[in-house]
Amino acid sequence: MEVTIEKFNEVYLRIKCEPGVAKELSEFFTFEVPNAKFMPSVRSRLWDGKIRLFSPGTGKIYLGLLPYVRRFLATQGHKIKYGEGIRASRGIEKDLVKKFVNKISKSLKVRDYQLDAIHHIINNDRGLILSPTGSGKSFIIYALIRYYVDLLPDKKILVVVPTTSLVEQMYTDFADYGWFPDEHCHRLYSGYDKNTPKEVIISTWQSIYKMPKQYFSQFGAVFIDECHLAKAKSLTGIMTKLHDCQYRIGTTGTLDGTEVHQLVLEGLFAKCKKVTTTTKLIQAKQLSDLHISCIVLDHVKANRKNRTYQEEMEYLSTHRLRNLFITKLVETLEGNTLVLAQYIEKQLVPLCLMIIDRCADKNPHLVYGATPTEEREQIRAIVEQNDNSIVVASYGTFSMGINIRRLHNIVFASPYKSQIKVLQSIGRGLRTSENKEGLKVFDISDDLSYNNKQNFTLKHFGARIEIYNKEEFDYKILPVKLKG
């Protein structure tokens, strides 16, 4: 059968085909959401827990999924006819891109994979760049912004980041690269005007996702940094409102490993391009050496029993001897240390007070969601200028996107399964700096196995080990008996 594929707008393709082919496409592009069975909407039967990327009714599917659509139809033996708007890459020579990048980065040595990523985006108008923490992702964004500012004199550039800290950091990075952000860039979050004559708007998604579609018509190019968060409806909403925005770039340090997550992102942007790996950057001495100590706390039999996940997290977060063990560990570490925990009132604050009590000379700082952006930046600056300080922070504020070069130790005080959170957290300390031999990570887990059944967080530890093996990280497992 003949199937026609045409470009509907900058968000969607439209596929014209027989009902039988539409049914095949619908089935192929339908996925079960991981752990959907635990969601209230599924339990109450309001939703079947599946995401359908192709609509048989409208024939629409995300434009970025064209390679998958093409491959599926070809394997099914269907003849493909391309309609208006479907074209190949621009065919721009890499040497021309190299000349442009060298022109805007005279004081910087651009790495080959950065140039490859920039060339790939310019050549295809869009892209999803997978570039690990410390690989210079912000420079890739900067170079592309400079390109599109010249290309689109009558349009603005939108850059969306997850947090206010990252707004400020990107603003500072652009200045470090030799640009003048005061002249060209407008920061947008609470307290800032949503309208500006400047060419580039750097915003958190919270600040703009409720804006009407008309607001987004001013943008000719969009960048979503840390775009693994684009699975949230708010960011997906932003991308669909940008239906006339031709240049669409997503960047991230990691994906969560699920097929449906990656396909949604590739649909919104383009097929994922992995530019390098953390292991390659470490081998090239572009990132610090990494050593992971996996400390497995063996709890006494009296404290082992069947618990729900929430009961187990409550027990571990409030366990005084466990927090005391973490405090003593932090006390022995040399260099700047970042301690990450999950629950603010139950663990983060009490743990910070214990650390202050034993390590007052290291001037410990507490950072969580309520900490003002300016204060976070001040703390980051203090750590950069010292060799023996401590930051106790929530995963949400310091696991993603915050650059601290002079970070020597990271302690995972709360068990975490998320591949994104684990890799992003490790990435906080992999940047190189003077007088820094490497990064030490202390991954603390707990053995509460009962009746030959592993507890929840011990299973999560097993998932983190799989991540370490996949990334080829150097780690060792150290069992420790926790008395009481």
Image (tube, helix red, strand yellow):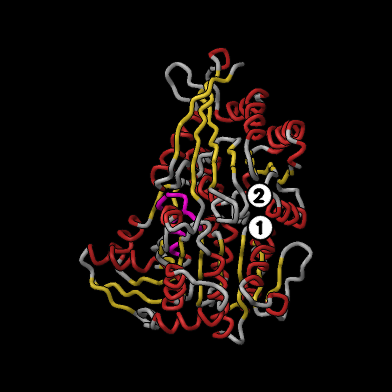
* Residue furthest left in the image: 77
Residue at 46% across, 65% down: 128
Please identify the quarter of the rendering in which residue 20 is found: bottom left
Q: Secondary structure at mark 1?
A: loop
Q: Amino acid at mark 1?
A: Thr
Q: Secondary structure at mark 2?
A: helix
Q: Determine which residue is flagged by label 2.
A: 397
| Region in magenta | 253-267
Whether 87 is drawn above or below 330: the answer is below
Task: Mark 1 and mark 2 in contact? Answer it, CB < 8 Å.
Answer: yes
Q: Which of 307 and 360 lies nearest the eye of the viewer?
A: 360
Whether 67 is drawn above or below 419: the answer is below
Residue at 70% across, 44% down: 389
Whether 227 is drawn above or below 157: the answer is above
Residue 226 x/y as whole percent? 55, 59
- Local crowd size for mark 1, using a 10 Å CA cut-off: few (<14), some (14–19), many (≥20): many
